[in-house]
């Protein structure tokens, strides 16, 4: 028994350092890989264990891993890669290898990512490196940043949370003259941010209202940006 206890303590101590993570069927709070090499922590405690719940949504940008990409790095040049995805919960670039193991890229070495013809860049926000999707580029660029919240299911009927759920939120940023600025999607703030010698804020607002467009719909937003740079 003493040898078994020592072995268990040794396994627990090395788990955080393993490059190849182990799979788990329990879907803990930190589960973002959905079966692709999830690392689950050892629980030596006693107490009530919730039953398994269905999980809605995903923490990943792409719905599946049938992807191809090109990774541009600072130190190693560029290279092509398959089965690559962006973990929005951890805000990391990941790739599957050996069928059930996940490799996480060091964001400090990443410059640009292109996956299935979608472009992404790395920017520092509040001291942390984040991955942004580029949705527009013509004279200036507009990027979208995703954040993911994890809502854990509960057996308590008063909470009305019968499933685990990943909730995605989006923020848009203007990148102009090497400066990243968060975009407020009200017509007044937006028009002031984008007014220039070519187009004033009043003209932008008039175009939005006349065309019955919404800044909160991405397709409409791109139409408005094209009007601004016309």
Image: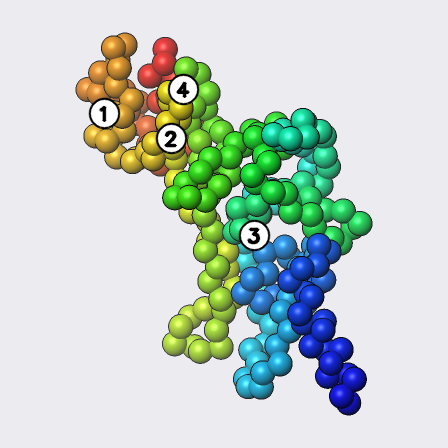
Left or right? Give the position of 221 relative to 134. Answer: left
Q: State left or right for residue 88 relative to residue 41.
A: left
In this view, the residue in front, 141 or 190, is 141
Residue carrying label 1: 192
- Residue on which disc 4 sits: 140
Q: Percent position (x, y) of residue 33?
A: 63, 55
Judging by the rendered image, the residue that carries numbered circle 3 is 58
Look at the picture and state if 10 lies above or below 168. below
Residue 99, relative to residue 207: is it above or below? below
Which comes before the other along the chain, label 2 or label 3? 3
Q: Secondary structure at mark 2?
A: strand
* Marks 2, 3: nearer the viewer: 2
Task: Please name whichever residue, 76 or 166, is drawn nearer the observer in this view of the structure.
Answer: 76
Q: Looking at the rendered structure, which numbered label has been put on residue 180?
A: 2
Residue at x-position 56% and y-position 62%: 30
- Choose the circle earlier in sequence order: 1 or 2: 2
Query: What is the C-alpha distance between the residues marked 1 and 2?
Result: 16 Å
Give above or below for 41 relative to 175. below
């Amino acid at each position: 028994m003493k040898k078994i206890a020592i072995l268990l303590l040794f396994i627990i101590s090395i788990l955080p350092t393993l490059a190849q993570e182990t799979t788990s069927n329990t879907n803990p709070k930190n589960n973002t890989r959905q079966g692709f090499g999830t690392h689950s922590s050892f629980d030596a405690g006693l107490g009530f264990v919730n039953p398994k719940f269905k999980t809605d949504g995903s923490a990943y940008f792409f719905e599946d891993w049938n992807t191809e990409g090109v990774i541009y790095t600072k130190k190693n040049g560029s290279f092509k890669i398959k089965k690559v995805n962006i973990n929005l919960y951890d805000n990391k670039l990941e790739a599957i290898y050996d069928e059930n193991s996940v490799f996480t890229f060091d964001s400090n070495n990443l410059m640009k990512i292109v996956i299935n013809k979608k472009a992404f860049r790395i920017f520092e926000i509040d001291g942390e490196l984040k991955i942004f999707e580029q949705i527009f580029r013509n004279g200036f660029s507009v990027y979208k940043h995703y954040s993911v919240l994890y809502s854990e299911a509960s057996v308590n009927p008063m909470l009305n949370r019968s499933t685990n759920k990943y909730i995605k939120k989006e923020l848009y940023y203007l990148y102009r003259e090497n400066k990243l600025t968060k975009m407020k999607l009200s017509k007044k703030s937006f028009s002031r941010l984008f007014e220039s010698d070519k187009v004033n804020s009043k003209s932008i607002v008039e175009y939005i209202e006349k065309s019955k467009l919404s800044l909160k719909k991405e397709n409409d937003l791109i139409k408005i940006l094209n009007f601004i740079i016309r």
